[in-house]
Image: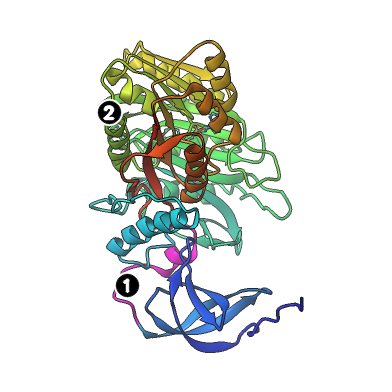
Amino acid sequence: MSKKIAPVKKNDQFEADIIDLTYQGMGVAKLGDFPVFVANSIPGERVVVGITKVASSYAFGRVVKVLQESEDRNHDIDNALVTTGIAPLANLKYPAQLTFKQKQIQELLKKQHIEAEVAATLGMENPFGYRNKAQIPVREIKGQIETGFYRRNSHNLVPIEDYFIQDPKIDEAVLIVRDLLRKYHLSAYDEVNHRGVVRTVMVRRGYYSHEMMIVIVTKSKKLPMQEVLVDEIRQALPEVTSIMQNVNPDKTNVIMGEKNNLLWGNKVIFDNLLGLKFAIGPNSFYQVNPQTTEKLYTLAAEKAELTGTETVIDAYSGIGTISLTIAKHVAQVYGVEIVPGAVDDAKRNADINGIKNAKFVLGKAEEQMIKWAAEGLKPDVIFLDPPRKGLTPELIEAVGIMKPKKIVYVSCNPATLVRDLDEFINTGYQIDGAIQPVDQFPQTTHVESVTVLERQK
Ligand code: SAH
């Protein structure tokens, strides 16, 4: 076969219709059958495209000029939000974002030849300022410490002050810490030379409790000016109840290291979810959108149709949020989770809330479930809430051995969801009712959903 030759080269300009939107939120234009992915363009628009990068079977472009605009375009936004990874869908009006997410699941199901209904995405009333956590890279630009976000597909920091989707109190905290780092002349981490001190500022704020945790992630073991930083943070931010240093000495993209030093206050913050109290440590996963998480878990519990007699497994249990919120509707719930700190939090959360019928185990879900099966544990319902990479074949096999009547799959990635659903269908399960997308991450391309599977007779 002859090598394909791209019909464009860098800096070429041409007029084109935007005919589709990728799952990453890029508009798609076609030159014959050659796709060009155009940043910040929307289906239905006619634009002048400027080519920014060419590969053998596709190219990237930017909008030089909009000739005809889509009705779905949202103007009220800062361009930096779309060009960084913060809010890549913010150029779409909110109803169009919700449709985009529903359609994404529908298309993936169709490709996999799975027949299932996808309900309209449940959205937020105010789809802004919802994130209860921020991890903000700290870099030096022109001799000054800056906080912001990386331009998409790069590690070039774009300084940002209003992050749009984060709790505004978190934005404020990030700026206060940035200004203190400037004031006391700390050095920012330099990725290229693997030098400097401060890599990331992490802030978490309880949606109900308003307790705030600040974590300064450093490359070095030592955090210079530690005492005065703590004093000033406490003075400027009275909501802060925990100040930590996390040490990450490695040359890596992973944000947090393993070692935490408590600089002041508590090692955890507390927040509420569906009426229960949760302790949340710096390394534990906690859903970033507390408002829709309540909707999501309520829905997942409803869909499981729990009657109080069931034995339930919550694989991927994190700090126990699903287990503990369903505990009162079941006989016994078993959680399994791979991060030790999260399991400690989960046990503590069961105690805090006086819940006696939830047991948490540290381990890999796929291995622990085989152990439980061997011990004779027969769950009626299994909740699955895996990370983006979805389930392993071993996990699906373990479910096949346990043969629960129902599986409730909470997914944050439609691609792996659909792949896994196909496996479950082959193992003797069928999708019960509609798949329900819930917009956990407005303004971003992330798609969360709940699917119920039922064992066929
Ligand atoms: N249900 C929880 C956590 C969901 S996030 C909540 O909503 O808060 C997914 C969790 O799975 C994370 O806590 C992660 O640490 C954990 N995890 C990842 N791989 C795992 C595995 N193989 N076995 C068990 N837990 C795993």
Is 78 situated above or below 427? below
Instruction: Indicate yes or no whether the magenta region holds residue 332.
Output: no
Q: Say what secondary structure mark 1 lies in.
A: loop
Q: Position of residue 319 (x, y in %)?
A: 44, 26
Q: Position of residue 295 (x, y in %)?
A: 28, 39
Q: Residue at x 75, y 77 (%)?
A: 3
Q: Residue at x 54, y 37 (%)?
A: 391
Q: How far apart are the alpha carbons under marks 1 and 2?
A: 43 Å
Tally of marks: 2
First of labels 1, 2 by sequence position: 1
Mark 2 Cα shell of 10 Å, populated few (<14), some (14-19), many (≥20): few
Mark 1: which amino acid?
His
Residue 338 appears in the figure: no
Picture quarter with the N terminus: bottom right
Magenta span of residues: 69-86
Q: Quadrant of residue 75?
A: bottom left
Residue wearing tag 1: 75
Q: Say what secondary structure mark 2 lies in.
A: loop
Mark 2: which amino acid?
Glu
Residue 370 appears in the figure: yes
Label drawn at residue 353: none
Q: Position of residue 235 (x, y in %)?
A: 38, 37
Within 8 Å: ligand 1 and the Cβ of disc 1? no
Is 219 situated above or below 378? below
Residue wearing tag 2: 305
Mark 1 Cα shell of 10 Å, populated few (<14), some (14-19), many (≥20): few
